[in-house]
Image (cartoon, helix red, strand yellow):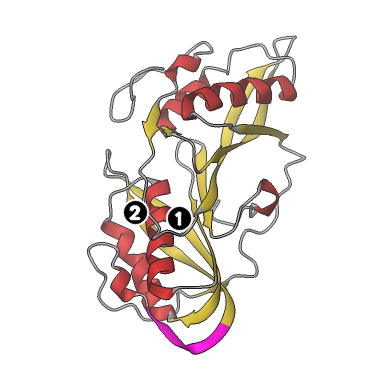
Amino acid sequence: MGGNPLGRQTGIPRHYSPEILHPMPREKIPVDGAVMHGLDHWRAYELSWLDANGRPGVFVGEFLFPADSSFLVESKSLKLYLAGLNNERIKDAASAAERIARDLSACCGGKAEARIWGLTDYPDNCLLADYALIDGHLVGKIEDGPDAGLLETGDESVVDRKLRTELFRSICPVTGQPDWASAALAYSGREINEPGLLRYFCAYRSHAAWHESCAERAFHDILSACRPERLSLSLHFLRRGGLEINVYRGTAPINPDQLLGRDARQ
């Protein structure tokens, strides 16, 4: 594999170069003895190659990584890898998906999956239509970083809730650039105080961490502070350089059939 291109000036590869993919060790965040399931779902909007006659095509790619793989694939290296396919002759979408899945699996140290969609057959549906927006609550002071002490629950009555916020933002730990996301939370248990939950998510605005680490820290903090019977959390980051990253974590196994569609921001 190549070195980490993040933060370095790099040219656009003119040829297929799987060695450019760069693995980064996953940050393991303990969850107090609980089992955490999940997957990382990436969408690529600038996917292209040449067919057998040399005619270019444009596609949407979906890449799935298991949350327990040994490594993350560094996103800039993936953008460069995909750019290297632009002048490659590939028989069809199935062949492209097989090649990409093989290369991503080798990089992440787990079994990655690749799906390729034409622009007219992508199964597009609303991302968070049945999740209640909590952004109308007053936040007041925004903390300098996530604080689990902001998370509180009510009485012993058990509720089922699906909540979302569009105000999540974190910081890239290398470039210092902002990473915006929609956050979605579904749980069963004692009712979580919504103003405190919103204030907790807003506190990530100055927090420098990878997407996956942000999701796992939030999952850990909510699980530890609120003790829900069931919890699923997903962060849906907006695209940069044609790549969009969606991180899913939960107390129950998550399979690709449960992935949420795109919303207006994506």
Q: Residue 8 appears at what percent x and percent y?
A: 28, 25
Q: Viewer-proximal residue, 114 or 236?
A: 114
Q: Is residue 233 above or below residue 196?
A: above
Identity of the residue drawn at 57% across and 36% down: 44
- Please tell me whether residue 155 belongs to the stretch shown in magenta: yes
Type of the residue with mark 2: Ser
Secondary structure, mark 1, is: strand
Q: Residue 162 appears at what percent x and percent y?
A: 58, 72
Type of the residue with mark 1: Ala
Q: Viewer-proximal residue, 65 or 97?
A: 65
Q: Residues within 10 Å of mark 1 (few under 14, many from 20)?
A: many
Classified by dominant secondary structure, the portion drawn in magenta counts as strand
Q: Kindly report the distance in space between the C-alpha atoms of the residues bearing marks 2 and 1.
A: 8 Å
- Please tell me whether residue 10 belongs to the stretch shown in magenta: no
Quick check: marks 2 and 1 in contact, CB under 8 Å? yes
Identity of the residue drawn at 42% across and 75% down: 226
On residue 62, the disc is none
Q: Residue 124 appears at what percent x and percent y?
A: 70, 50
Identity of the residue drawn at 41% across and 17% down: 1
On the rendered structure, is 94 left or right of 173?
right
On residue 181, the disc is 1
Q: Which residue bears the numbered disc 2?
A: 170
Q: Residue 155 appears at what percent x and percent y?
A: 46, 90
Secondary structure, mark 2, is: strand
Region rendered in magenta: 152-158
